[in-house]
Image (cartoon, rainbow, N blue to C red):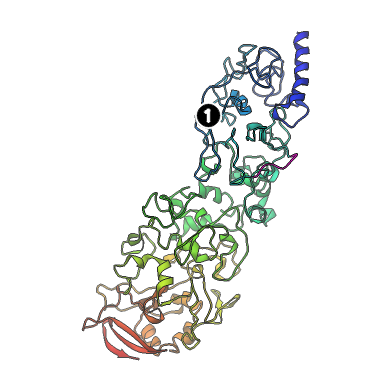
């Protein structure tokens, strides 16, 4: 026993000299850690017969050929390894020379913890031949794969996706430039990060270990890196998904959303299904605005909950499985959180139309000329990814008569039977008259006398940072937004954005359409109230200009007297006819001579031929 004790002391000294790729000088710090399998150890898992702390991994004689005087049997199993569509590095099976292979002697779950080379099988209190259970978080291949673990035993492609750790950083690559288990973990010291106690080489508070290699563009100034609400940040506890032991989004950093081992979604190591990662904060418990309730409670919503985690960060215009333009449909159409939000770059910054706000920063887009954009500059470019030329969108069913639950869709005169009718990019960029979303109209005040000088909030008060003029542009989200959010201009703390609305077509305010009559050209219309037209009134003074006949001398007659809705005559997106006139064929029909035509002769004047509400117009002048 004295000889054995002396050998143990010599081995501890030798280990202190050679290091096992660890940055800690006191290898005796292994005592009473989870890696201390002595019978007298305070660890939950320990041997039944020996008090030698080193023998489970090292031996001074008859060791496995190679480095570190290795005494544990090595696994010969090769499991599938991590891969993803965005991975630039080449990941191969663990090689014999990789120090990670030594760690896997125990951590791949195939070799008994006491199965040594020189000392035979050492019995454990948990039973002879005890291996890490498949359900143990320490068993990296408990599911027979390493595909849902951070890759190891490979040379990172630093120019493409990571940076090398700084000089003298405890996180380091091995002499071959490979990232090993020991790049992040010191197997002899459990408490270099006293909070996690996971044998990390240094504290991982605010993801310091991760940030040694991963420098995501925009992260340092993003809202997720520096959440503004400290009180709310502290509410992010282990019960809300944190697995590190830290409290708060700031302190968890990357691991608020990611998990380096055994996440639910293997690609990019996302710890839960995509929307559930977002909802762990954006359900009102951490972030003050409850986005989750819009998806769960609103009548109309983007279909985030229908396609969990389908978004792929590698999506692009030539991909067969994405939401951008393509030649084949590929995977199911999707509208995931990450299609509109880049969690590494989003901020609370505001902007003026058409520029993206901070919440949409760093998101891919589709330009008005149908060019793919790695980062959208304007808000409409984010929307055009799906509401443009995308073949991954079943357009006729989505917006045609069948619909998918977004309310009745007008059947437009200039769009009937034309698939481009469902292409919002083409509507805004190719039409002769249009709302100024993708380009300004530069009309004179005489042509649009109803235009307000400033957008008004839902209470009728001007919004000071949203001036309007003949050359203004507007956002898609000026119309399509939450019907209960702070976008309404009140002091509400509710979330804004087109996540969900109780108003058809995801509108933020009312723009009620006429019920479609049994036969186009007939019907009794819908009674006028300002409450039914608050969306138009947001930018156009309905009461004091539109109904005062300042732009069209029979507006009042049609809207109040004939009970026509704005959408009966006007297309809110665009038209090939002047002044957004694009009749809804569900309500309007050709006249008795078979003519359906509007002709503008000058501002406020023209002729009309149609049948509507039982009235026959035959080249009627106004």
Residue 342: image quadrant is: bottom right
Magenta region's main secondary structure? Answer: loop
Position of residue 524 in the picture relative to residue 529 (left or right):
left
| Span colored in magenta | 163-168
Answer above or below: position of 252 versus 574.
Answer: above
Element type at mark 1: loop
Which image quadrant: the C terminus?
bottom left
Q: Position of residue 108 (x, y in %)?
A: 56, 26
| Camera sees residue 41 | yes
Answer above or below: position of 282 versus 518.
Answer: above
Q: Which residue is mark 1?
A: 142
Answer above or below: position of 123 versus 528.
Answer: above
Residue 107: image quadrant is: top right
Which image quadrant: the N terminus?
top right
- How many marks the image carries: the answer is 1
Residue at image x 67%, y 36%? Answer: 173
Residue at image x 59%, y 40%? Answer: 259
Residue at image x 33%, y 85%? Answer: 599
Residue 164 among those drawn in magenta: yes
Q: Position of residue 381 (x, y in %)?
A: 49, 64
Q: Using the image as rendered, state which of residue 196 and residue 169 is in the foreground.
A: 169
The single residue placed furthest to the left in the displayed view is: 593
Q: Residues within 10 Å of mark 1 (few under 14, many from 20)?
A: some
Position of residue 516 in the picture relative to residue 282 (left or right):
left
| Camera sees residue 265 | no
């Amino acid at each position: 026993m004295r000889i054995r004790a002396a050998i143990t002391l010599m081995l501890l000294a030798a280990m202190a000299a050679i290091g096992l790729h660890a940055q800690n000088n006191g290898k005796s710090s292994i005592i009473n850690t989870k890696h201390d399998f002595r019978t007298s150890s305070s660890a939950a898992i320990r041997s039944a017969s020996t008090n030698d702390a080193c023998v489970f991994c090292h031996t001074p004689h008859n060791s496995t050929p190679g480095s570190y005087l290795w005494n544990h049997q090595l696994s010969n199993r090769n499991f599938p390894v991590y891969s993803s569509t965005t991975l630039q590095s080449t990941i191969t099976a663990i090689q014999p020379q990789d120090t990670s292979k030594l760690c896997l002697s125990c951590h791949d779950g195939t070799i008994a913890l006491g199965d040594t080379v020189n000392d035979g099988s050492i019995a454990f209190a948990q039973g002879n031949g005890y291996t890490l259970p498949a359900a143990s978080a320490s068993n990296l291949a408990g599911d027979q794969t390493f595909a849902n673990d951070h890759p190891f035993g490979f040379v990172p492609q630093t120019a493409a996706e990571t940076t090398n750790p700084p000089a003298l950083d405890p996180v380091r690559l091995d002499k071959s430039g490979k990232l090993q288990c020991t790049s992040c973990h010191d197997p002899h010291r459990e408490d270099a990060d006293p909070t996690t106690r996971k044998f990390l080489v240094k504290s991982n508070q605010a993801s310091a270990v991760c940030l040694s290699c991963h420098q995501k563009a925009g992260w340092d100034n993003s809202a997720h890196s520096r959440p503004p609400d400290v009180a709310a940040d502290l509410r992010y506890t282990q019960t809300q998904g944190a697995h590190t032991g830290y409290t708060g989004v700031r302190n968890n950093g990357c691991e608020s959303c990611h998990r380096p081992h055994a996440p639910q979604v293997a690609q990019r190591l996302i710890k839960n299904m995509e929307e559930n990662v977002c909802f762990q904060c954006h359900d009102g418990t951490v972030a003050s605005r409850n986005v989750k309730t819009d998806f769960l409670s609103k009548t109309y919503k983007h279909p985030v909950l229908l396609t969990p985690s389908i978004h792929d960060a590698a999506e692009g215009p030539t991909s067969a499985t994405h939401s951008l333009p393509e030649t084949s449909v590929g995977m199911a159409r999707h509208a995931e959180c990450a299609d509109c939000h880049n969690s590494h770059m989003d901020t609370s910054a505001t902007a003026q139309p058409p520029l993206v706000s901070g919440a949409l920063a760093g998101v891919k887009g589709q330009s008005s000329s149908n060019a793919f954009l790695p980062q959208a500059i304007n808000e409409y470019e984010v929307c055009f990814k799906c509401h443009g030329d995308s073949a991954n969108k079943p357009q006729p069913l989505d917006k045609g008569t069948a619909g998918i639950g977004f309310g009745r869709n007008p059947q437009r005169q200039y769009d009937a039977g034309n698939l481009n009718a469902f292409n919002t990019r083409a509507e805004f960029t190719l039409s002769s008259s249009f709302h100024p979303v993708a380009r300004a109209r530069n009309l004179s005040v005489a042509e649009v006398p109803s235009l307000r000088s400033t957008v008004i909030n839902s209470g009728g008060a001007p919004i000071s940072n949203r001036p309007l003029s003949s050359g203004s542009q507007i956002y898609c989200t000026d119309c399509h937004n939450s019907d209960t959010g702070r976008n309404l201009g009140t002091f509400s703390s509710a979330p804004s954005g087109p996540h969900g609305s109780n108003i058809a077509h995801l509108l933020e305010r009312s723009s009620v359409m006429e019920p479609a009559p049994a036969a186009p050209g007939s019907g009794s219309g819908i009674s006028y109230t300002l409450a039914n037209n608050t969306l138009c009134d947001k930018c156009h003074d309905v009461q004091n200009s539109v109904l005062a006949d300042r732009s069209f001398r029979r507006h009042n007659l049609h809207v109040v007297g004939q009970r026509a809705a704005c959408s009966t005559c006007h297309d809110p997106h665009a038209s090939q006819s002047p002044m957004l006139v694009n009749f809804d064929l569900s309500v309007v029909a050709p006249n008795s001579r078979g003519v359906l035509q509007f002709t503008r002769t000058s501002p406020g004047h023209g002729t009309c031929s149609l049948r509507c509400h039982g009235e026959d117009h035959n080249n009627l002048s106004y």
